[in-house]
């Protein structure tokens, strides 16, 4: 009988532990909601006063850096002094007729203009298509026109996605570059932006087109031309007017 009583005692103890475990665990995954990711508050010094609200605020993301803790992609954009707000004062622009000669980019699902001389096709990597203007003496800057799958996080609206893409293109301009918006408007399946990039005493004209070509990611078309090749600034309008979905 003692053996039986000991066995019953063990069973009762296991049942009690299981009941306790059930009580502390959520009954379903919806009971644990993921909150926003924020920067951890500064730990107070053992001998000093509690931190002020300013000390526990989110850190401001530095230009060109990865997202600071707690910041969304758009918040980081708005905190970047290199990229001004896109206001209603930035108007649409009339676009030329699309070019009949195109380059097909099957990875983005887009067809883009095949620009005439002095543009020429170049090795695309790390992009999927690439056209360039001739190199110039005394500078590494020259016109480039590239396409690739969207290299940044897609946003809910094509306009916001285009804004983030324009910020990303500053990686392909000299350090200290700043944007001034020249035109902004929707295009079929996406959005386009034309802008000036100023760096020191020089500037480039640039544009991005974000367009959904039916692939896993939208496609990006990006063109930039420095002021030393300003005769080709007219090609920027041809680029944004000529981007379209394949098929």
Image: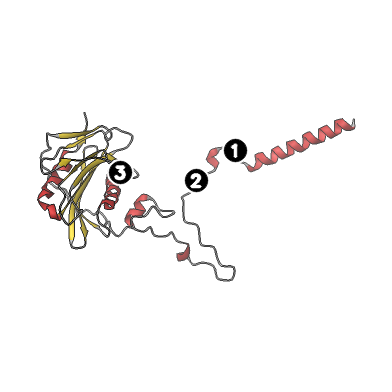
Residue 236 in percent (x, y) is at 15, 46
Q: Is residue 136 left or right of residue 153?
A: left
Dividing the picture into quadrants, the one containing residue 58 is bottom left
* Cα distance in 3D space between marks 3 and 1: 37 Å
Whichever of labels 2 and 1 marks the residue nearer the N terminus, that label is 1
Q: Is residue 183 visible?
A: no
Image point (33%, 34%), residue name: 216
Q: Is residue 71 left or right of residue 51?
A: left
- For residue 157, the mark is 3
Residue 231 in percent (x, y) is at 9, 50
61 relative to 243, above or below: below
Whichever of labels 2 and 3 marks the residue nearer the N terminus, that label is 2
Whichever of labels 3 and 1 marks the residue nearer the N terminus, that label is 1
Direction front: furthest residue: 137
Image point (30%, 33%), residue name: 215
19 or 135: nearer the viewer: 135
Quarter of the figure that contains the N terminus: top right
Please identify, in this view, whether the residue under mark 2 or under mark 1 is nearer the observer: 2
Secondary structure at numbered mark 1? loop
* Cα distance in 3D space between marks 2 and 1: 16 Å
Circle 2 residues within 10 Å: few <14, some 14–19, many ≥20: few
Residue 20 in percent (x, y) is at 69, 41
- For residue 34, the mark is 2
Label 1: which residue? 27
Direction right: furthest residue: 1
Q: Is residue 231 visible?
A: yes
Instruction: Identify the colour scheme used.
Output: secondary structure
Circle 1 residues within 10 Å: few <14, some 14–19, many ≥20: few
Residue 87 in percent (x, y) is at 23, 54
């Amino acid at each position: 009988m003692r053996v039986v009583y000991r066995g019953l005692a063990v069973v009762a103890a296991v049942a009690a532990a299981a009941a306790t475990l059930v009580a502390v665990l959520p009954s379903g995954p919806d009971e644990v909601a993921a909150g926003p990711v924020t920067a951890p508050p500064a730990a107070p010094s053992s001998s000093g006063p509690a931190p002020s609200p300013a000390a526990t605020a989110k850190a401001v993301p530095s230009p060109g850096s990865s997202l600071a803790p707690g910041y969304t992609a758009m918040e980081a954009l708005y905190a970047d002094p290199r990229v001004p707000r896109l206001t209603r004062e930035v108007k649409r622009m009339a676009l030329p007729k699309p070019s009949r000669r195109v380059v097909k980019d099957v990875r983005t699902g887009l067809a883009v203009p095949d620009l005439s001389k002095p543009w020429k096709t170049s090795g695309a990597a790390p992009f999927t298509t690439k056209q360039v203007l001739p190199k110039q003496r005394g500078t590494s800057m020259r016109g480039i026109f590239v396409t690739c799958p969207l290299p940044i996080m897609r946003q809910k609206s094509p306009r916001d996605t285009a804004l983030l893409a324009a910020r990303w293109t500053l990686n392909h301009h000299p350090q200290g570059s700043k944007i001034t918006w020249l035109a902004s408007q929707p295009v079929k399946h996406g959005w386009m932006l034309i802008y000036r990039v100023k760096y020191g005493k020089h500037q480039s004209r640039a544009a991005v087109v974000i367009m959904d070509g039916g692939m896993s990611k939208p496609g990006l078309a990006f063109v930039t031309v420095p002021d030393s090749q300003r005769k080709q600034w007219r090609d920027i309008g041809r680029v944004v007017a000529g981007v379209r979905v394949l098929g």
